[in-house]
Image: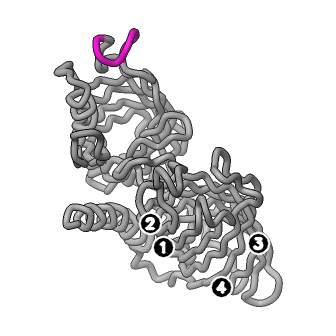
Amino acid sequence: MENTILKCFQFLISFWSVSLATITVAGAQSDTVRPQIEGGTVFHYGYVRPEKVTPASAHPPVGVELTLGRLQTGQRAWQQCNCFFRAGGYFNYYSFRNLQALGHSAGVGAYMEPLLWHRAAFSVSVRLSLGVSYVSKLYDPIENPNRNFGSHANGMTGVGVYARRRLAGRWSGVLSMEYRHLSNAGIWQPNQGLNVPSVGVGLVYGPPAMKLPNPQSWGKAPMLSKRWFGRAVALASVRVMAARDAFPERSCPMFGVNLLAGYRFTKAHALSTGVELLNDGYMKEELRRGGSSARYQQATWLAGYELWQGRVAFTAHFGWNVVRPGAAFMGQGGYRPATYQKYGLLYVLHNGLTMGIVVKAFGENTKGFQLAVGGSF
């Protein structure tokens, strides 16, 4: 019981630290331009039913979300992401409309929403969100064999496109398309997770019609204007291996380093490549339970794309495990799959200090969140 409480505490700390950092970064502004507060409600309707669930889902999920945020239009906000943006927090509730297999969820989190196109009567933006959710139905080998959720606490990450049309005064209508993923990042097993794509419609009460400032004279940080750049970050995470046979449940830490070099071909778009070295305790435990003392350290070559919005970067890399556990234990050809994807959300301070969160995935299967701290140069 104490071990379970400790893991819940660690899980909440890791997700809330990132969420609070997002709010702090987005809200760090002392310009004379006062941020504009707004609040709204959006109803979400899923456009696919969850697959591979027993009993099968007859209806797609539905949800409702309440948000409270600010429209950031000052110089410091612009220099953080080379954009004007909304930022704030949300509370949401989803019914998966399959009480026996999936149940429902309730969650809180933070979002950042850069404006892509803005006019007094109409605007388009893209929203990035991160939070933690409570789900009601867990895996049980007899009563609920679905492996979507192995814990009540799960992270919720999302990306969406939002269109707003001013209706009257401070009221605006919202139409959105959102893609969200629920999982515990492998901290508990099983962890298949759940994808929730949806369309949304809602109302927002916010600032009156306004013209945004002209940022042409504000410039950008010198470091972010370099064509060539480098980054070195330390990675850390923990995954829990479930009890099996004579082996008890065990928390397995992972430590590593990510070394990348990149080229920025526009102010917002860059390509980067490099290596990642991992000391994976989860893999070590998996080998030990199989009676093997084979090498468990891994080395990966990474190559991919980075989208920069000022000091905020979204990274997407393809990885190839050049060094991985060998064929002697894992079968002919070695540990599989030999390739995976890594997605990161990073923030670079003025002195180059870099921090954020990275997700490792095999296709749609999330294998773990990793905290990243290091430097960019």
SS at badge 2: strand
Front label number (3 vs 4)? 3
User: Spatial distance from mark 1 to mark 2, Cα to Cα?
Assistant: 6 Å
- Provide residue 34's location: percent of width, then percent of height: 50, 84
Q: Amino acid at mark 2?
A: Val
Q: Which residue is mark 2?
A: 132
User: Spatial distance from mark 2 to mark 4, Cα to Cα?
Assistant: 26 Å
Dividing the picture into quarters, in which one does residue 165 lie?
Answer: bottom right
Q: Amino acid at mark 1?
A: Val
Asked if the stretch drawn in magenta spans residue 192, the answer is: no
Q: Amino acid at mark 4?
A: Gly
Which comes before the other along the chain, label 2 or label 4? 2
Q: Which residue is mark 3?
A: 201
Q: Which residue is mark 4?
A: 206
Which comes before the other along the chain, label 3 or label 1? 1
What residue do we see at 41% from left, 41% from top? Answer: 367
Observer able to see residue 264: no
